[in-house]
Image (tube, rainbow, N blue to C red):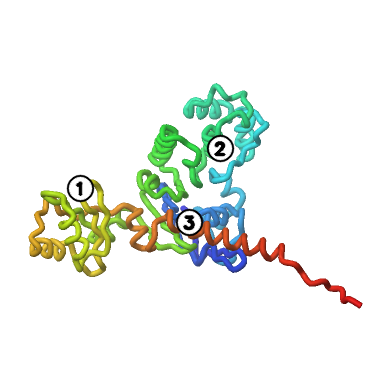
Amino acid sequence: MIELDGVSKSFGDKHAVAGLDLRIPRGSTYGLLGPNGAGKTTTIRMLLQILEPDAGEIRIAGEPVTRDILDRVGYLPEERGVYKRMQVGRLLSFFAETKGVKPADSKPRIREWLEKLDLIDRIDARVQELSQGMQQKLQFIGSILHAPDILILDEPFSGLDVINQQVLKDIVLDLKRREKTIVFCTHMIDQAERVCDHVCILARGEKVVDGRIADVKREHGGMHVRVGFEEWNAEAVNTVRRAAQVESLHEHGHELEVTLRQGSTPHQLLEHLMQQRVRLGTFSRIEPSLERIFIQRVGATPEEMAAQYARSAEEKENERMRAATKPRRSLWRRG
């Protein structure tokens, strides 16, 4: 449904997206994942023609992106995009009109969605009277009033409490059952794992993982095992930690999640532990989480990468401020 071939975008000397190739299948729920600064939002903005790529081609349904094609797309941006002095009902009617839906047709849809998201009693309220979570739900309604074939959600859970996150996930799953193509753009990898069937993980503007989640996990599945002991003790944990086959481990209660080194197998680790007379309670291969795969491929957690990005941005801003306030020599000569 959506194809990107060699798409790149730079801002000054920063490569936001570098030679990105993507294939988003029709009817899939596709997670575009990664930390802040990975290039997710830039990719979406190029897809929607908000930004022009420096290189590469983008196609929707096999065709170059046009205004008519974009009318088949619903977009929930990460930033708030609401007119705060407008009434809720009128704002939604306006959103629908921008996508070619007449007020007579949008009115029943608006009431239906407001009821579904528990906002019907706010239909005449001004947007500025709503909480951040309510405004997020309002923007979501605005993105789907025209019944788009493609729905792009950029950080859709921002500002929502746990209950409303679940409501939104249920709606996304219902749209998925109706074979809508959904692009789910977020740094919350665990959330995306619950609703997506395909995934692309971006880091520093480049693709590091791409494919069906089941295939991605199968590809990395031999690298992770769960180890439990008959009796939990520090000596047994250290025996596992020092094993030549072990790259890293994480404690979960009284069990260990172990990542194996490249070329090592679960059987080799099991043999080693038996030789060391470790009294095992459990030993099994496990399906790694997407976050664990991310760490394995990138070498850092999404939170660590986001912090690095934030520090880099802060350093650049400080450098810019120092340059702006640095005294300049006068162009006029004395005498």
Q: Which residue is at the front of the view, 293 or 44?
A: 293
Question: Could you say where residue 203 lies in the image, as x and y percent from the top left?
Answer: 45, 61
Image quadrant of residue 224? Answer: bottom left
Disc 1/disc 2 C-alpha distance (Å)? 44 Å
Amino acid type, callout 3? Ala
Disc 3/disc 1 C-alpha distance (Å)? 30 Å
**Element under label 2?**
helix
Which residue sits at x=43%, y=54%?
303
* Front: mark 1 or 2: 1
Amino acid type, callout 2? Gln
Would you say 66 lies left or right of 170 here? right
Q: Is residue 105 visible?
A: no
Q: Which residue matches tag 3? A: 307
Which residue sits at x=19%, y=60%?
238
Q: Which residue is at the front of the view, 91 or 28?
A: 91
Amino acid type, callout 1? His
Question: Could you say where residue 240 lies in the image, as x and y percent from the top left?
Answer: 18, 60
Which residue sits at x=59%, y=68%?
13
Is disc 2 surrounded by few (<14), some (14 to 19) or many (20+) residues within 10 Å?
Answer: many
Give the mark count. 3
- N-terminal of the pair, mark 2 or mark 3, is 2
Q: Which residue matches tag 2? A: 139
Q: Is residue 220 visible?
A: yes
- N-terminal of the pair, mark 3 or mark 1, is 1
Image quadrant of residue 178? Answer: top left
Would you say 143 lies left or right of 210 here? right
Q: Which residue matches tag 1? A: 254
Would you say 333 lies left or right of 314 here? right
Q: Which mark is residue 8?
A: none
Disc 2/disc 3 C-alpha distance (Å)? 28 Å
